[in-house]
Amino acid sequence: MADLQISNPFSNLQSVFCNSVDAVLSVLIAPSCAACESLLEHPTQGPVCPLCWASILPLTPPLCEQCGDPLPTWRAISVPLARCPRCRRTPRVVDRARAVGAYHGALRAIVHAFKYEGRRSLARPLADLMRRRGIDVLAGASCVIPVPLHASRRRQRGFNQANDLARRLDLPVVPALRRVRATATQTDLPAAQRHRNVRDAFAVTRSASTLGRAIVVLVDDVSTTGATLEACARVLKEAGVKEVRALTAARVVSSR
């Protein structure tokens, strides 16, 4: 006997309701996608259209085992532990870093809307992508640690985007770091000055004493040169943490 297909009245009613709300919002407000600015057909499903989400491609392997930058294929074949020239030239404190994708196109627009326009509903779908594409970084970790904002920046923005992402990665969130010095935004600085800008800007909190010799994952929205992540990792390792990994929503891919 064929299986009986039993419809869910509540699910059908919910679908009809959402479609009705979508139609009303489309007429009254005409909301646009936060990434491509096209009109949203289903605004109740979030501020970004399905096409923009689908356009976010993962970084193409082979990747640097340490920072996550794409590598030329020959290097992955010829070197067992493949690392990019920058990681081979300069010792890194972060043991392994990964990101959802490159910081351009739709992903850049989405992160900008989340971070600067207060579209906090984007934290969940961004974290879903981070969880799927950063599975190797999260595996075996005991907790995630959001990169903190200085109190003045936190008051100005109203939230810490790194904390919003970390709370949705299905691991315990430990506020093990605090920013003890206000710094200029990294966005306005050339690469050579970013490490100096965040030097001694972080310290551990009392929560760090619970970590012991743990494997932890730093969480942030964007990694540009990795200076902020490196500064955080250095403080955590000085406090006794065994391994520090990093997972971000996006990363600026180094030009070769």
Image (cartoon, rainbow, N blue to C red):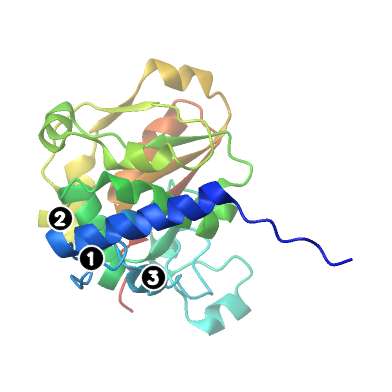
Residue in the picture at 53% in, 83% down: 73
Image-quadrant location for residue 157:
top left
Q: Amino acid at mark 2?
A: Thr
- The answer to whether the residue labelled 3 contacts the one labelled 1, judged by CB atoms less than 8 Å apart, is no
The tag on residue 56 is 3
Q: Amino acid at mark 3?
A: Ile
- Examine the rendered structure and indicate whether residue 186 appears above or below residue 60: above
Of label 3 and label 2, which has the lower sequence position? 3
In front here: 58 or 84?
Answer: 58
Residue that badge 2 annotates: 187
- Examine the rendered structure and indicate whether residue 140 appears above or below residue 39: above
In front here: 133 or 181?
Answer: 133
Residue in the picture at 18% in, 32% down: 154
Q: CA distance from mark 3 to mark 1?
A: 15 Å
Toward the right, the furthest residue is: 1
In the image: residue 128, left or right of residue 44: right
